[in-house]
Image (tube, helix red, strand yellow):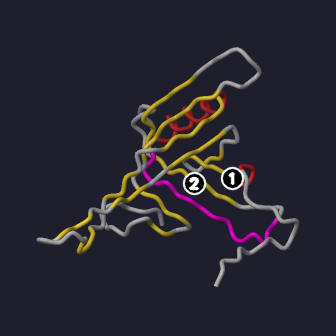
Amino acid sequence: MPFTPSLPLINGNRFDFSSVAIKLNGKRYTGIQAIDYTPECIPGIVYGQSTAYPIGRTRGQLKMETANLEILREDFGDLSQDLLTVLGGGLFEMNFIVTVTISESLSPASGIAQVDTLVGVRFSRYSMTAKQGPDPLAIKLDFTFMNMLVNGVALLTSPTIPVVS
């Protein structure tokens, strides 16, 4: 049977960047220009004696090393002060939660909000480029995270990493 995507009943709107609300440590910063995160789990392939075909695979290890966000310089100033006030410590030492909520208010038939929760976020690199022209100054922040929930479901079940309740 062919896959038939459900269509919104009102005006056909689908998600775009205006459908995304990003909160860092519980606060929404409207100056976030982009966010990119790529969790992956690559299982090990298990071979037996004298066989060219795999006989199984391991669970693998969850890797969440490739992630970054871009935020306007003014909002970064607010973010860094907010994190310092609430969490204390250096910018590359603080752990917090990021929530990415995707919903389309103009088309409620598109379903309930989709929520990614990144747990144990920690910044690891700061990059700013200033150049002549009309574009606003922005900061790119690379980060790592320890776990992720997709609509409340963990990527892997493990009792060793706490998840948000």
Task: Quadrant for residue 103, please give it.
Answer: bottom right
Q: Residues within 10 Å of mark 2 (few under 14, many from 20)?
A: many
- Residue topped by disc 1: 20
Residue appearing at x 37%, y 52% in the figure:
63
x, y percent for residue 119: 45, 54
Residue closest to the eye, 44 or 66: 44
Q: Is residue 116 magenta?
A: yes
x, y percent for residue 30: 70, 42
x, y percent for residue 132: 70, 14
x, y percent for residue 53: 24, 71
Residue appearing at x 74%, y 18% in the figure:
133
For label 2, the SS is strand
Q: Name the side, left or right, on which 41 lies relative to 72.
A: left
How far apart are labels 1 and 2 at the CA level? 10 Å
Report the mark closest to the observer, 1 or 2: 1
Residue closest to the eye, 149 or 163: 149
- Residue topped by disc 2: 99
Q: Please, which residue is most extreme toward the bottom here?
A: 1
For label 1, the SS is strand
Task: Quadrant for residue 3, please give it.
Answer: bottom right
Q: Amino acid at mark 1?
A: Val
Residue closest to the eye, 57 or 75: 57
Residue 58 - label:
none
Q: Amino acid at mark 2?
A: Thr
Residue closest to the eye, 42 or 155: 42
**Over which residues does the magenta segment extend?**
107-121
Q: Residues within 10 Å of mark 1 (few under 14, many from 20)?
A: some
Q: Please, which residue is most extreme toward the right here?
A: 11
Residue appearing at x 58%, y 36% in the figure:
79
Residue appearing at x 66%, y 80% in the figure:
2
Mark closer to the chain start, 1 or 2:
1
